[in-house]
Image (cartoon, rainbow, N blue to C red):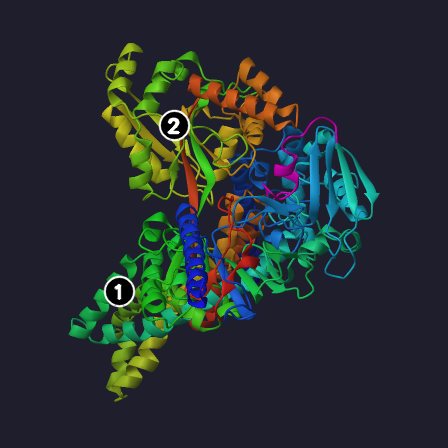
């Protein structure tokens, strides 16, 4: 072979190799589209540090922020106290204070991040965690009266053992399949960890006035019901992509309950972020989901949005079927009609075009529910279909049940924070029900009344409301909804019977995922077959950002806003 | 005078007692505070425990007696919603913001209301008078929340001139302008009509005719002699409105996220924070009773013809 021929051969080989590589690359990316990386502080022209980020919210859970005596879920302590685990932007459970963990029928054990410290510099130890669990359980009453769910701690948790300075083992009295959802931060915002020495020194009262923790921020100013100003803690030990020192030096949360005023704050750039933009406004704003990636500024205007889905859901409940054993007012057989007849309940479901309601009443921001459990929660089945829209069949069923001309009824709901669009959904549903002859009057009652009247079975005699909208904040484990909603001692009951109770027992008696899943699926199918509830819709929260914000990696589902330490801004 | 003051104080105290009793009963009748303190998932055992923790397990009459005792000892208990804070501290922390807002609104209403009323009263049936009357009717017809939202749209969103949320220490005096104007606009209208009416009466009175006959310049007749008497009802209304608005600027505070006691009261009512509701209502009622008494006493100084009986 001549040298020229050899060069040609090498050139051909090179050309073929490069061509093949390019072809493979192209094919791979056709099959698997590029996932754009989030901008990072200090990289590619993005400033390493910016001054302040201001966020307007319509609510932040409870205003009680101490970790050992909370009165309910609260989001603000995420920023200065510690969670064991959290979820990343792909909804995966990821480490936070706990670097590794395991859940068995005997209990939960985990390792503490080796560099974790409190704001005063003291290391976070296993002893700190043990003290915290015991304080929440109420072991140190009366100084620390315990978590509002202290009974749950007492009934569920056995011993909290210090294996060594970095390892904790918590035994459970019986299998606790919802342990991670409740206790770790990968579900609720109910359990946070703060510095025991500081708590013992200042007490809960002192802590509420001057909080301290171990998270990415310290609290510079706290005005309950008004605002919280947080300052970046430059010695923060978190080194995860999802949990790290923030770019901004100061983070301010302000409470702005009026939604028009909250959006005005965003439009006028008085705030950088506004949580819970009304759907009717958000539909006209650039949505990051439609562009590069959810949570990345699409650069299409002064304001952009990110939608967090499955933040809550709504179920239509036939309250007369709740069977509260100690309810002071039990429905009479007359009051139970017509919903004691399964055909009527079924007809009400068939009369609804849930897809159309989501698209028209909520501008496509919500997703009609097929089943009971949340999207991507443990127990959820994506293949479940939304109940069909069949008004002809609905009318037929009503006729068979003895209501050929339909009937009138009433429904009540409570307008909770982070539960947008209930009224709009119901009004749309009312028009569908009217088409089959069912006249529905809608009543709004304020949230406390709703809890008293629905959750405690204290429906008043003078205003019997056969239908109610039960709202759920997001639950990461269907077992939680089953526990509260579908068995005899549940405190937020839809309804139950022996069979649903039995299935709940099976689901809650083991941490074996396959066994739980089987029982939860059966329970869901059973409840749906009984038509005890009509699943309505999963709701979403739309977060609005000014164009100053380049990105905010956020879990796709959450019960409210989260992880603002991940926000990246351009100046 | 002394007997009058004692009599008024006695009736004021009776009014206060009735108000606190009514509030106490109403708040407790409308729901269990523990239901809103914690979520619906809370167990019955934990609910009972929290009731004991917050003293809500005691019989109603005992709770009421304890509250009455707290008024005299100054210990109003803990806010249920902000569990470790004294209800009195929470109230006091929010009071300045409302006083600032209401004071600014009333000052605005006086600064505009008085001159408008004078202009209108001294030029009856003129185009100025008609213009002022239209302004008065418009002002009294527009709900303050609607006005507030319009202001936000214009001055915040479109023009970007003024901030729309937060208290004085967060947004400064610029943040006070819109809420003060939207709250005070109704009072501008009310004051204008009141001064106009009073000016018309005063200008037709004998002493004004006497002053004119003496050759006193018109502007002194109007601004010194007539206005002095015409302003009396406005001044008394100023004080009464101040006391009333301190507890009642709820809507404006909500629209502008103004951290005053109006917002606090609404949050407390929604949350059945009984201690906080009681203290806010108690002090609001007490301030109205006291201000009414002071106004009556001042009246005798302003108008020597008035005798207290």
Q: Is residue B114 above or below residue A147?
A: below
Chain letter of disc 2 in the image: A
Q: Position of residue A46 (x, y in %)?
A: 51, 69
Q: Position of residue B142 (x, y in %)?
A: 29, 58
Q: Residue at x 49, y 49 (%)?
A: B266
Q: Residue A183 in magenta? A: yes
Magenta residues span A172-190
Q: Residue A419 in magenta? A: no
Q: Position of residue A343 (x, y in %)?
A: 35, 14
Q: Is residue A12 above or below residue A454?
A: below
Residue nearer the viewer, A453 or A160: A160
Q: Residue at x 47, y 36 (%)?
A: A375
Residue under label 2: A385
- Residue A331, quarter of the rendered image: top left
Q: Can residue B146 be seen here?
A: yes
Label 1: which secondary element = helix
- Residue B222, quarter of the rendered image: bottom left
Give the side of residue A351 with respect to residue B45, left or right: left
Chain letter of disc 1 in the image: B
Label 2: which secondary element = loop
Residue under label 1: B136
Q: Residues within 10 Å of mark 1 (few under 14, many from 20)?
A: many
Dominant secondary structure of the residues highlighted in magenta in the image? loop
Residue A261 disc label: none
User: Which quadrant: the N terminus of chain A?
Assistant: bottom left
Q: Is residue A507 above or below residue B207?
A: above
Give the side of residue A387 with respect to residue B20, left or right: left
Q: Position of residue A527 (x, y in %)?
A: 47, 20
Residue nearer the viewer, B16 or B115: B115
Q: Residues within 10 Å of mark 2 (few under 14, many from 20)?
A: few
């Amino acid at each position: 072979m001549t040298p020229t021929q050899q060069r040609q051969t090498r050139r051909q080989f090179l050309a073929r190799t490069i061509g093949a590589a390019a072809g493979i690359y192209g094919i791979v990316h056709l099959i698997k589209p590029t996932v754009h990386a989030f901008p990072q502080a200090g990289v590619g022209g993005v400033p390493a540090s910016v001054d302040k980020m201001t966020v307007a919210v319509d609510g932040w859970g409870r205003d009680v922020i101490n970790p050992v005596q909370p009165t309910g879920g609260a989001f603000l302590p995420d920023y200065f106290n510690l969670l064991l685990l959290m979820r990343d932007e792909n909804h995966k459970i990821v480490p936070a204070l706990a670097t590794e963990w395991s859940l068995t029928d005997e209990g939960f054990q985990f390792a503490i991040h080796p560099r974790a410290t409190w704001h005063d510099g003291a290391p976070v130890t296993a002893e700190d965690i043990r003290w915290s669990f015991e304080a929440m359980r109420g072991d140190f009453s009366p100084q620390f009266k315990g978590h509002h769910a202290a009974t749950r701690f007492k009934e569920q948790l056995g011993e909290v053992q210090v294996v060594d300075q970095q390892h904790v083992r918590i035994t459970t009295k019986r299998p606790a399949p919802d342990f991670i959802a409740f206790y770790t931060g990968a579900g609720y915002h109910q359990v946070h960890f703060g510095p025991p020495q500081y708590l013992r020194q200042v007490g809960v009262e002192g802590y509420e006035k001057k909080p301290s923790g171990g998270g990415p921020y310290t609290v510079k100013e706290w005005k309950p019901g008004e605002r919280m100003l947080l300052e970046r803690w430059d010695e923060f030990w978190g080194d995860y992509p999802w949990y790290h020192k923030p770019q901004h030096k100061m983070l301010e949360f302000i409470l702005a309950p009026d939604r028009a005023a909250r959006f005005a704050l965003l439009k006028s750039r008085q705030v950088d972020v506004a949580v819970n933009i009304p759907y009717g406004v958000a539909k006209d704003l650039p949505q990051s989901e439609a562009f590069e990636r959810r949570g990345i500024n699409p650069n299409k205007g002064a304001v952009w949005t990110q939608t967090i889905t499955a933040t809550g859901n709504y179920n239509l409940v036939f309250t007369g079927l709740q069977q509260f054993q100690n309810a002071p007012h039990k429905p009479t057989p007359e009051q139970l009609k017509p919903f004691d007849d399964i055909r009527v309940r079924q007809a009400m479901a068939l009369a609804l075009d849930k897809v159309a309601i989501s698209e028209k009443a909520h501008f496509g921001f919500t997703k009609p529910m097929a089943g009971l459990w949340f999207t991507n929660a443990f127990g959820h089945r994506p293949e479940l279909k939304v109940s069909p829209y069949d008004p002809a069949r609905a009318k037929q069923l009503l006729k068979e049940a003895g209501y050929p001309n339909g009937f009138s009824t009433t429904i009540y709901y409570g307008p909770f924070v982070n539960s947008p669009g209930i009224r709009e959904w119901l009004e749309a549903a009312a028009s569908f029900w009217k088409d089959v002859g069912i006249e529905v009057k809608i009543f709004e009652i304020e949230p406390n009344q709703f809890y008293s009247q629905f959750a405690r079975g204290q429906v008043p005699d003078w205003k019997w409301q056969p239908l109610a909208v039960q709202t759920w904040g997001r639950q990461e484990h269907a077992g939680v909804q089953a526990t509260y909603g579908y068995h005899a001692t549940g405190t937020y009951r839809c309804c139950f019977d022996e069979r649903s109770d039995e299935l709940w027992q099976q689901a809650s008696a083991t941490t074996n995922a396959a066994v739980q899943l089987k029982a939860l699926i059966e329970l869901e199918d059973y409840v749906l077959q009984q038509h005890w509830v009509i699943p309505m819709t999963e709701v979403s929260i739309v977060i609005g950002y000014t164009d100053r914000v380049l990105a905010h990696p956020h879990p796709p589902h959450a019960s409210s806003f989260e992880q603002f330490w991940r926000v990246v801004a351009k100046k | 005078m002394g007997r009058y003051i004692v009599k008024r104080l006695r009736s004021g105290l009776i009014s206060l007692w009735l108000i606190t009793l009514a509030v106490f009963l109403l708040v407790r009748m409308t729901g269990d505070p523990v239901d809103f303190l914690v979520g619906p998932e809370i167990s019955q055992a934990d609910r009972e425990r929290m009731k004991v923790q917050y003293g809500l397990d005691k019989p109603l009459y005992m709770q009421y007696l304890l509250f009455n005792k707290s008024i005299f000892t100054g210990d109003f208990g803990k806010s249920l919603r902000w569990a470790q804070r004294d209800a009195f501290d929470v109230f006091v922390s929010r009071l300045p913001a409302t006083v600032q807002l209401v004071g600014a609104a009333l000052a605005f209403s006086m600064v505009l209301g008085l001159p408008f009323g004078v202009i209108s009263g001294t030029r009856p049936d003129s185009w100025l008078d008609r213009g002022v009357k239209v302004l008065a009717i418009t002002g009294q017809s527009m709900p303050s929340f609607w006005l507030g939202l319009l202001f936000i749209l214009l001055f915040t969103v479109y023009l970007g001139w003024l901030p729309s949320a937060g208290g004085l220490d967060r947004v400064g005096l610029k943040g006070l302008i819109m809420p003060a104007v939207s709250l005070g606009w109704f009072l501008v209208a009310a004051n204008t009509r009141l001064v106009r009416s009073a000016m018309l009466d005063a200008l037709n009175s004998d002493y004004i005719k006497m002053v004119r006959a003496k050759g006193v310049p018109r502007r002194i007749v109007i601004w010194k002699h007539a206005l002095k008497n015409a302003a009396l009802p406005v001044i008394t209304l100023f004080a009464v409105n101040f006391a009333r608005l301190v507890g009642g600027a709820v809507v404006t505070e909500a629209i502008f996220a103004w951290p005053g006691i109006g917002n606090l009261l609404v949050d407390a009512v929604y949350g059945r924070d009984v201690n906080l509701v009681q203290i806010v209502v108690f002090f609001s009622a007490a301030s109205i009773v006291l201000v009414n008494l002071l106004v009556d006493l001042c009246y005798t100084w302003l108008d020597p013809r008035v005798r207290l009986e």
